[in-house]
Amino acid sequence: MQQQPSVIIIGAGVAGLAAAIRLAVAGYPVQVFEQNSYPGGKVSYFELNGYYFDAGPSLFTQPANIEALFELAGEPIDEYFQYRSLPIACRYFYEDGTRLVAYTNNSRFAEEAGQQLGEPADNIARYLRDSAHLYNKVGTLFLNFSLHKPAILFQKKIFTAVTAIRWRHLFKSLHQLNKHYFRQNKTAQLFNRYATYNGSNPYQAPGILSVIPHLEMNEGTFYPEGGMIAITNALYRLALKKGVQFHFNAPVEGIIHEHKRVRGIYSKGIPFTSDLVVSNVDTYFTYKYLLKDENAAEKINRQERSSSALIFYWGIAKTFPELDLHNIFFSSNYAAEFAAIFQEKKLYADPTIYINITAKCEPGIQAPEEKENWFVMINVPAATAGADMVAMQQQAKAAIIQKLNRLLQTDIAPLIEVEAILDPVQIETKTGSYKGALYGTSSNSKWAAFLRHPNFSKTIKGLYFVGGSVHPGGGIPLCLQSAKIMSGLAIPYIQQLQKRSRWA
């Protein structure tokens, strides 16, 4: 009996888990090697004195991506994973005291923007309508196919996509496009924020990023029961159910290849043979350390990194009714903030603050009764050599507390019962993201989508890539899509191997 071709996946992030599920369901033996003692990569969690914190991504959109995996596997998702839609996407706080509730009901949101910002409701409706149109014509093509295969040019949808793209989508920045749509600066600032969803600068990134609000505002914002870690737990359990074998505390030191074909990996000095290897490791590290290809690594290094993050995990001994699951406290000078991050490569003195509080959805579970678990994040530059992370932490904490004290009219510091910190250097160490860049390369160029690394190796047959540093990009939805695109390329390759083996 002919032995099935085997698969090795390097890294158990959400993209690695999704890739393992897809290839296992296709009938192939799959092994996953993970350097940490747990699955999930950035989508992990920890506990401090009764406060539970999601360590990384905190926004859940497009649950259909997860549902698709369970449908593919023939497993009932309700037995693994449950979630609910939210009436409020985010609460926004401006320096002049203006507050805005971004309802997930678009009519209600437009009414709120009219009342609080003075923005005509028709402007909001038109923007979100155009965002949906752009996503349906262009985004779905981008998310479901490799942009690095000639066959994409022959997809029927490519012609529809091309006709949907306007000059402003490619040759104007997201900020310029938003100023075109909106009368009020505060509204433009709100929609500029969506560039940060892939670690980019709205004053440089192309207007086509206006497709991103569609995912949150039109399709909806959701909360996974148990927090974001529930996504990791569900995918891990599903992978185990489908026979995937996991090796934890098992760093990979190299990818074995010869005659331009992958042969396996080394982990802890031991060779493991495989017909197909999928790297869920940042492409820079894959080339530099696993393939020992300095030239390819340096080529990746020349591309601009996305922004990173500095995160404070605070256990707060009070509840704040004016806050919700997602909250944004805007900088008074957004352009200066992004100039500091991307041009000056330094912490901005008055950073925009994001606070995620899962205790709002599960009070008494995610935090002790009458207390809250605050995930407090600001955007910062990707790590540079010699950067003083301790000084950055101290400066950022002082700026954050000062800003929150002012906008919430409360002395925050005495309320902090527990604290943990995650900086760009730690992000690189814990998650393998080069320089701590959350999304690999930035999208500050109109050609960024085409410059992002493909889901396959052009020089080594049988080597594939998934995760935030490759097409289609970072964030949970796109990472899950990277696994779908990869499997669509890898399974035909494996089938070719099987045919050749039968005729050999």
Image (cartoon, rainbow, N blue to C red):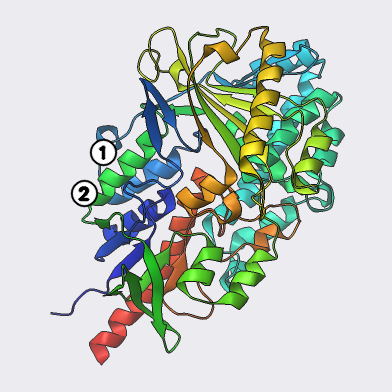
Instruction: Give the quarter of the image for residue 182.
Output: top right
Looking at the picture, tell me which residue is in the foreground, 442 or 378.
Answer: 378
Which residue is denoted by mark 1 in the rendering?
76
Which kind of residue does numbered mark 1 sit on? Pro
Identified at 44% across, 56% down, the residue is: 484
Residue 342: percent from left, percent from top: 76, 47
Quadrant that contains the C terminus: bottom left
Looking at the picture, tell me which residue is in the foreground, 423 or 342.
Answer: 423
Which residue is denoted by mark 2 in the rendering?
241
Residue 139: percent from left, percent from top: 62, 49
Task: Judge the density around disc 1: few (<14), some (14-19), many (≥20) Cα neighbours within 10 Å.
Answer: few
Identified at 78% across, 25% down, the residue is: 187
Distance from label 2 to label 1 (Cα)? 12 Å
User: Disc 2 vs disc 1: Cβ atoms closer than 8 Å?
Assistant: no
Identified at 32% across, 34% down, the residue is: 81
Closer to us: mark 2 or mark 1?
2
Looking at the rendered structure, the secondary structure element under dot 2 is helix
Looking at the picture, tell me which residue is in the foreground, 168 or 486.
Answer: 486
Look at the image and tell me whether residue 26 can be seen: no
Looking at the rendered structure, the secondary structure element under dot 1 is loop
* Residue reaching furthest to the bottom: 504
User: Which of the two labelled residues, at mark 2 and mark 1, occupies the earlier sequence position?
Assistant: 1
